[in-house]
Amino acid sequence: MIVMFKYSPFKIQITFHKLIQSLEEIAKSDIDYRSNYAKALLEKIESIPEFKTGIEDLNLIEKNEELIRYLLSDLFPTALTNNEIKAVTIPFQDFTFNYTERFKKILKEAGTTFDANFRDFNEDQFYIMSCCMILNVYYGQNFDLNIPLFYDIPDANGIVKHYRILYNGDFLEILPSSKNQLLTEEDFDLLRNNYDDIKLWKEKFPQESWIFKGFGIVQLFDATIESAVSILKSDLLKSDREKGEHKNFETTFRSIFKISDLKIGFTIFDEIDQKLVHTPFESKKIPSFILAENEDITCKNELVKCFYKSLIVDKKVFAISNMEHFIAHDEYKTLGSHLLKQNIKSCIFYPIVNDAKLMGIVELASSEINVLNSVNANKLDLIVPYFIDTITRYNSDFENQIEAIIQKEYTTIHSSVYWKFRKESQKYLQTYSNQKEYNFKEISFKEVFPLFGEMDIKGSSEHRNNTVKEDLRKQLTTLITILDNLNATSNLVLLEQRKFELESFAAEVELPLKADTEQQIQNYIETEIHPIIRNAEHNLDDELLVKSYFKKIDEKTGMFYHARKRFDNSLSLVNKKLAEILDQKQIEAQEIFPHYYERFKTDGVEHNLYIGASIDPTKKFDKMYLNNLRLWQLQTLCEMELEHHKLKKELPYNLEVTSLILVFSSPITIRFRMDEKRFDVDGSYNARYEVVKKRIDKAHIKGTTERITEKEKITIVYSHKQEETEYLNYIKYLQFKNTIEADIEQFEIEDLQGVSGLKGIRVKVVNTGN
């Protein structure tokens, strides 16, 4: 017999007084067989007054088990005893008796060691529930604590079943005892707002302050599937840290499918590589029966072939009810043998699909034949939505982790090559989850064709130096004027020396600037001149001149910043506009064939493109795509030239640009440099391309002092005859479209260090605005 809770607001009096009153009414009726039955029963219980006054010794119930069954026969019909799960109970107490046959069978299968406890409820919670029942029944309040109660009871095979508990209180009375204290409206409000304060509840409802008289009826309903789905949903919503063991996960599935040795597996589908891989979640606590000891399997593998069409392509359930029959077919032998080695004799592979995309495969396996099949596979329909939510959430978290690794280890990566960095980051996470060390590999792409182009500000260094000189000249002249005025009203001999030093600096500014000239002048002015003019006494006119001077000084540099500001603003406007055009046109270019793209702003805008099969292995590469991209590059530079021509009218400082394309037809290898966080060419042969790229814009036409680049013109640098032919065809086409003017300049380029034989083509873009 199960012991009741030690603490309760009730003093329990188990009685059948209401039932006995009903029998006494029946005994008075005219229906003979009912009347006689009631009289006979009343005669038998007459010798046991406790049935009416209250049973305090629970052994009395056990001694009169048969008589109690007769007494309760109207409430427990014999015809339903093998169907209903019902017993007499004291509500909210683990105490029951007078079980139906089905209830007895359930408890017998659970075993003698089983202790029927309420799920997720402790003694304090039941104390409060008892108090709420008093408030509702006796005081007429509405304390709604209708929380579902469950018993989790294992069957003979160890499968845990979940039973919903329902109570009938028709034969109960709740009465105040001598220990009772009447409650007020203030007490009701206090209790409503303090559910968790068990001390308060026990204060208002002391132990045994109420009499619980009569009995209740408990009825169980098998809610195994609904409850197991709810448990599974709660478990899936938990974070990794909160999750229980995989064994608990399997227990829930066993309850749903009623299979004692059911095993659960899961496999991720990698759409990029067309592979089946282990889940990186929960440190691979969830196994994969498809993969077993394999790290991954491609979709071309023999193991996958027999279910590839139905499971991966059509995304339909793949079930094997009898492995021995399955393996008899030659095309299924590889998979069948693989599963039999794991003692799997029936299984279900259920695809998890979201937005028509296969995310993974849930695997159910058993060592018994026929227990898993395409019929009971439909039970997974109840669970799959929660799997989709969970995997989506996991994937989102996983992608965030990958993104964080890429940002930390590789910096921002162009979308065309992102897949390879993602793959490397995924390997790291999978290795890390198994508590193994992992060294990041350098990412490389072989056999790619480079395209380089730039639009450079012509004479940017000279422009910058001129604006620096202009600002220095104006600042020095202003300071000399201020010192002259001070000298006229002051007896400071030092002023003449400071004026001489400023004039010396002014003379130096007229010469070619040295690297440290500006810094020297700045330090001198701040330490020697500014203290003098700030501390000196000025007349009204000089005071205005000094204030005007300090207003012209830039806060960051402490120097005049007027001419340079016009130059810097113009440079920024040009770079911004040219970069916008290039980035916008790049979106269209990616449609030609996915390729790596990077763009830099310096004194102008330059870009690198790399195209080849290794950039996107999922697509078939053809030289046609390279040719298409080259034409795109030439057209884009033409558009950038035209845009600059329009922009010149708006610039605060006139800037001209020169454009250059470097043609290189030999494929190279690029490698991501982990230390520099950027791509670079790999190998000594490939380094020739980088040498040319860095030096070509300063090169001259062979035998002359003329630069190969010229304002408002595009220079194309190449090495081979076929490259010349290719680009002359592009130029001819763009001349037909009235994009490029008719004149074409062709020339040889002077030898660079370690590089010779370069040639150039120079063309002018048609300016429609002239």
Image (spheres, rainbow, N blue to C red):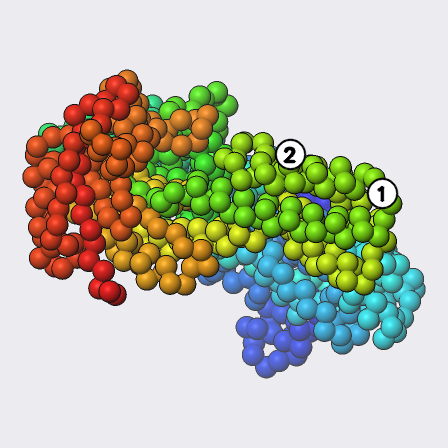
Q: Position of residue 550 (x, y in %)?
A: 71, 54
Between 751 and 89, the one lying in front of the other is 751
- Specify the quadrant that holds the C terminus: bottom left
Taking the view exactly as shown, the residue that stands out farthest to the front is 488
Which residue lies at the image location 34% right of the left edge and 23% below the top edge? 293
Q: What mark, if any, has residue 520 been given in the picture?
A: 2
Q: Position of residue 545 (x, y in %)?
A: 73, 58
Name the residue tied to disc 1.
Answer: 492
Q: Position of residue 729 (x, y in %)?
A: 8, 46
Q: How many circles with numbers are drawn on the protein?
A: 2
Q: Amino acid at mark 2?
A: Gln
Which residue lies at the image location 68% right of the left edge and 68% below the top edge? 144
Q: Residues within 10 Å of mark 1 (few under 14, many from 20)?
A: few
Which element type, helix, strand or loop, lies under badge 1?
loop
Q: Quadrant of residue 751?
A: top left
Q: Measured along the vertical axis of the image, is residue 268 above or below residue 377? A: above
